[in-house]
Amino acid sequence: MTEEQEKTASNNTISVADAGPCRKKVSIEIPEETIKKATDEQYQTLQKDALVPGFRKGRAPRKLLEKRFGKDTTEQIKLKLLANASETAIKDQKIDYLREPEIDYKKVELPAAGPMKFEFEVEVRPEFDLPPLEGIELTKTKARVSESDVDKEIEQIQKWAGLWTPKDGKIENGDQLVADVIIKTEDDQQEEKIENTQVFVRENGFAGPVLVKDLDKLLIGSKTGDTKETTVDIPKTYYVEKYRGKNVQVKITIKDVKWLKPAELGPELFKRFEASNVSELRQRVQESLTGKLEQQARQEMNTQLYKYLLEKTNFDLPLDIVAEQANAVLQRQYLNLLRMGLAKEQIIEKLEDLKAASDQQAKEELKIFFVINKISEKFAIETSEEEINGYIAQMALSQNQRPEHLRQTMERSGQLSQLSLQIREDKCLAKLLETAKITEVEQKPAAEKKPAKETKKVETKPPKKEVKETKEAAPKKPAGKTAAQKSDKDKKETKPKTAAKKKAGK
């Protein structure tokens, strides 16, 4: 927009009103004189370039031009006025938008006389105050590894290194099935069939793309050749859009059953841990578990920070973004698992659980995203290229990949921006830990421990235009960026493009 256009657009009458959680309704009235000036300028430009039979270039009279090109010219004038007026309104009213406004230009008419009026809604960043960030009271569990812990870890290692082996007889918890799955939604007469897919017998397991609660109860005791059926009520924020909020019928026909045969304690398993015997293996496992407990203690403190920030802040969320959040959860959690260096089998197992992000989890993660964003602004915390490259090198090492190849893959999939957000979030939490009041506590005996809950990591695929972070953010197709995940830099450099502006070729 030129200075002249901006000055002209600023003469518009603008009103802004609340239109729901994190939404503003913008009403604009463009005065008749502005329309007339824009019309004159458009025809002056057209007159210079138009080729009309019987007239030299630039000599055709305006009335003839209006008759010959009036419809298209009127449309172009309207689109330019809409684009300039909406852009200036957002700027002048300091609207901290998430998604670029989409204006239905077809419903707006350019009047022959009088002002032109139109309105649109836009999603905005929630407004709230940060709670006190210094002296947050936290507890830290001391890391202690027992011989029993080592025994259990070695048993688990044997399972991870084991082989799925065919079995006869009835299905038991933890088995792996090869099955044909038929899915039918309540509003679709056509069935969706998925042949020879893997189904793991567990409490909450997947039959194709559908998460089935109490899947173990449905399948345990069955055998090859049996068919089991159930119905599932899919949450409105489910990661697969076509199933959201629907009742889905699931039919599972069992074709093959396997059980996990643990690997033997021997040279092959020892070699993976750079050990030559059981004693050295136990030592390596002891060191590994100690490191994991230290990491777990740090994560527990992070969880306490999340809880504190959630309890101490209160604001509405942009509802349209909550469903998108479920996809972002998977993307960022997937990065976390890579950074932890988990085995492929572990990652696959955890990802299936992560796909079941609940509505409440999505809301909490989105809320934390906005809070972390504000904390990063308060302390001027940013992510450097050196930090991103360092994390990529760490992940590449754990995955036996070349760093440059992994970076290219992440760029294509959209995970690179998610990694930047994750690094920034980690730095924000580390900043809060610097001034926190931390009390060390003894680790509870295994019998007293409560089942650990999956730590929800705040992440957003947030809406089509990120909230000044990376033009989001939670694993999935690698999902594209959402509004909440756009960078401040992107937002400053990219002017709001309305549908009208795109149409006008601006």
Image (tube, rainbow, N blue to C red):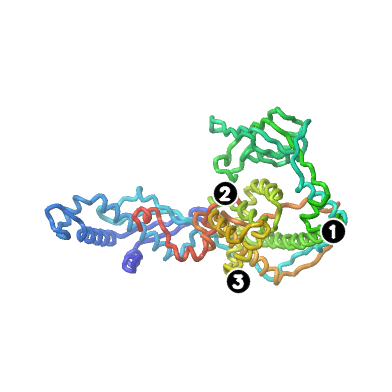
Marks 1 & 3, CB-CB < 8 Å contact: no
Pick whichever, 99 or 12, lies toward us: 99
Q: Which residue is mark 1?
A: 280
Q: Which one is earlier in the sequence, the residue at label 3 or at label 2?
A: 3
Q: Residues within 10 Å of mark 2 (few under 14, many from 20)?
A: few
Q: Which residue is mark 3?
A: 379
**Screen quadrant of the N terminus:** bottom left
Q: Which one is earlier in the sequence, the residue at label 1 or at label 3?
A: 1
Nearer to us of marks 3 and 2 is: 2
Q: Quadrant of residue 131?
A: bottom right
What is the C-alpha distance between the residues marked 1 and 2? Answer: 41 Å
Q: Quadrant of residue 459?
A: bottom right
- Side of 339 relative to 189 (left or right): right
Pick whichever, 500 or 121, lies toward us: 500
Amino acid type of the residue that numbered disc 1 sits on in the rendered structure: Glu
Marks 1 & 2, CB-CB < 8 Å contact: no
**Screen quadrant of the C terminus:** bottom left
Q: Residues within 10 Å of mark 1 (few under 14, many from 20)?
A: some
Amino acid type of the residue that numbered disc 3 sits on in the rendered structure: Phe
Nearer to us of marks 1 and 2 is: 1
Answer above or below: position of 104 versus 470: above
Residue drawn at 77 percent across, 45 percent down = 162
Whether residue 425 is visible, yes or no, is no
Q: Position of residue 37 (x, y in %)?
A: 26, 62
Q: How many marks?
A: 3
Q: Position of residue 368 (x, y in %)?
A: 62, 59
Q: Which residue is mark 2?
A: 477
